[in-house]
Image (tube, helix red, strand yellow):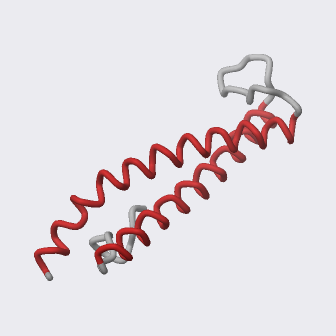
Amino acid sequence: MAKKKRKLPLVYQPVGFVFSWASGALAGYAFQQVWKAVRHEDDAPDALDRERGWGEILLAAAIQGAIFAAVRSAADRTGAKAIERSTGTWPAKDKKGRD
């Protein structure tokens, strides 16, 4: 069983990559939809957009960060639970997680 626990993070890496990629795409789409609902604009401001003010840029960054963090956590948790169900072992090496 100890051998299985050592190899599991290696097995989890491709699964984690797929979940991370999918969650990034989903979070980007969700952010676009939320920004459209909040500001009625198709494009969120970029930090280097000269015509946008600080408040607007920081609001967009805060919303985007919150969405990405929530979606990433949901994807990580879903992937870990799927690995645990299929192998009986939690994929993290320690209880601290990624962050």
The quadrant in which the N terminus is found is bottom left
Give me the residue at 66% from left, 27% from top.
47
Residue 41 place in picture, x, y as percent: 84, 28
- From this viewpoint, which residue is outermost toward the left? 3
Is 28 on the left or on the right of 45, as rendered? left
The residue at 41%/69% (across/down) is: 82
Residue 58, image quadrant: top right
Residue at 65% from the left image edge and 51% from the top image edge? 67
Can you say which quadrant of the picture contains the C terminus?
bottom left
Residue 32 against residue 98 in the figure, above or below: above
Q: Residue at x 30, y 51 (%)?
A: 14
Picture coordinates of residue 17 (x, y %)? 37, 48
x then y, percent, for residue 80: 40, 68
Counting labels gives: 0
Residue at the far front: name it: 86
- Residue 15 sits in which quadrant? bottom left
- Tell which residue pokes out farthest to the top in this image: 50
Q: Is residue 20 left or right of residue 56?
A: left
**Foreground residue among 84 and 9:** 84
Residue 71: x and y in percent read 59, 55
Q: Would residue 60 be found to the left or right of residue 14 on screen?
A: right
Image quarter for residue 56?
top right
